[in-house]
């Protein structure tokens, strides 16, 4: 039987809702054989996840999803298979944590201006690790300000909305360089979710490749066949390795660990370079 890989998912060390242990237990239920925990700008959940994965016979790969700025747009770069204790990686993630903390405080201040009192302090209570926009969205739902998380982003938290705060994230070349220095591979996460035209996406991929990037997420949950084939074509055109990831954050009907993550046959899987058997 072909192994099931899921190389992009989140725990409550960032904006996921399951603990690292619960996440790995769910991966086992969904027959995932190899997984990477890729929390946003933190590796704090990996040790706990690894302990559970070893008990269940799942191969866990060190991962992280690094927030970057490119052409005034936020782009996520996934790092896989790196030494999470490497000093360059540690320094980068410490800097990202400071940026994320300040952004969270600034979002809280903006929400206070529109009548949401003590937003930062109250949202902190929902976070086991860093405070993210997802935590603010959940808080806004909990107080009845919006009906659901999607509405919270569309009304308040997306770029151009009243509570959006642009963060001073690292740039893509720095993210790639640090991932490489720590012995890992750098991947463009969910390329079709950046709300960009094909022209801009190709510019992003070209820049990423020229800066030494390694791969691109080809297969994810909820894609159409045409979307997957399009990204596969780009992977081949730019000689990038093909990765797969659900981007799982919490149990729901449309995004699930290991669900529909098969690669088109003409792609070179990222795990061949990660030396996973």
Image (cartoon, grey):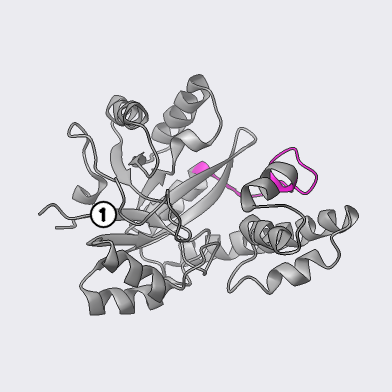
Residue 59 appears in the figure? yes
The answer to whether residue 167 is seen in the rendering is no
**Residues in magenta?**
156-172
Q: Residue at x 46, y 67 (%)?
A: 43
- Is 1 on the left-hand or right-hand side of 4? left
Which picture quadrant has residue 56? Answer: bottom left
Of residues 184 and 76, the one drawn nearer to the viewer in this rendering: 76
Quarter occupied by the N terminus: bottom left
Q: Residue at x 30, y 54 (%)?
A: 258
Q: Quadrant of the C terminus?
A: bottom left
Residue 260 in the image: state x and y as whole percent: 29, 45
Of residues 202 and 145, the one nearer the viewer is 145
Magenta: predominant secondary structure element? loop
Return the residue nearer the eye: 238 or 192: 192
Residue 182, image x and y in percent? 38, 60
Measured as percent of width and height from the top left, residue 225 is found at 31, 30
The residue positioned 48% from the left and 27% from the top of the image is: 201
Count of marks placed on residues: 1
| 3 falls in the magenta region | no
State the residue in front, 209 or 149.
149
Corner quadrant of residue 233: top left
The residue carrying mark 1 is: 5
């Amino acid at each position: 039987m072909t192994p099931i890989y899921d190389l992009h998912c989140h725990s409550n060390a960032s904006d996921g809702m399951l603990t690292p242990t619960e996440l790995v237990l769910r991966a086992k239920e969904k027959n995932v054989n190899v997984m990477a925990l890729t929390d946003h700008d933190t590796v704090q959940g990996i040790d706990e996840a690894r302990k559970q994965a070893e008990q269940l016979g799942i191969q866990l790969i060190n991962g992280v999803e690094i927030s970057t700025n490119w052409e005034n747009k936020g782009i996520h770069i996934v790092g896989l298979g790196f030494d999470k204790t490497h000093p360059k990686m540690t320094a980068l993630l410490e800097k990202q944590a400071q940026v994320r903390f300040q952004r969270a405080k600034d979002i809280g201040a903006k929400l206070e201006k529109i009548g949401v009192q003590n937003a930062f302090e109250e949202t902190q209570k929902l976070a086991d690790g860093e405070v993210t926009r997802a935590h603010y969205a959940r808080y806004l739902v909990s107080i009845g300000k919006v009906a659901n998380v999607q509405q919270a982003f569309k009304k308040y938290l997306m770029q151009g909305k009243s509570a959006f705060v642009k963060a001073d994230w690292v740039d893509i070349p720095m993210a790639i360089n640090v991932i490489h220095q720590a012995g890992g591979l750098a991947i463009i996460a969910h390329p079709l979710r950046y709300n960009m035209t094909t022209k801009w996406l190709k510019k992003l991929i070209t820049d990423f490749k020229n800066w030494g990037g390694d791969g691109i997420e080809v297969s994810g949950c909820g894609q159409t066949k045409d979307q997957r084939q399009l990204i596969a074509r780009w992977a081949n055109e730019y000689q990038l390795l093909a990765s797969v990831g659900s981007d799982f954050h919490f149990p729901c009907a449309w995004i699930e660990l290991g669900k529909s993550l098969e690669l088109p046959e003409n792609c070179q899987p990222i795990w061949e370079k990660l030396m996973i058997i």
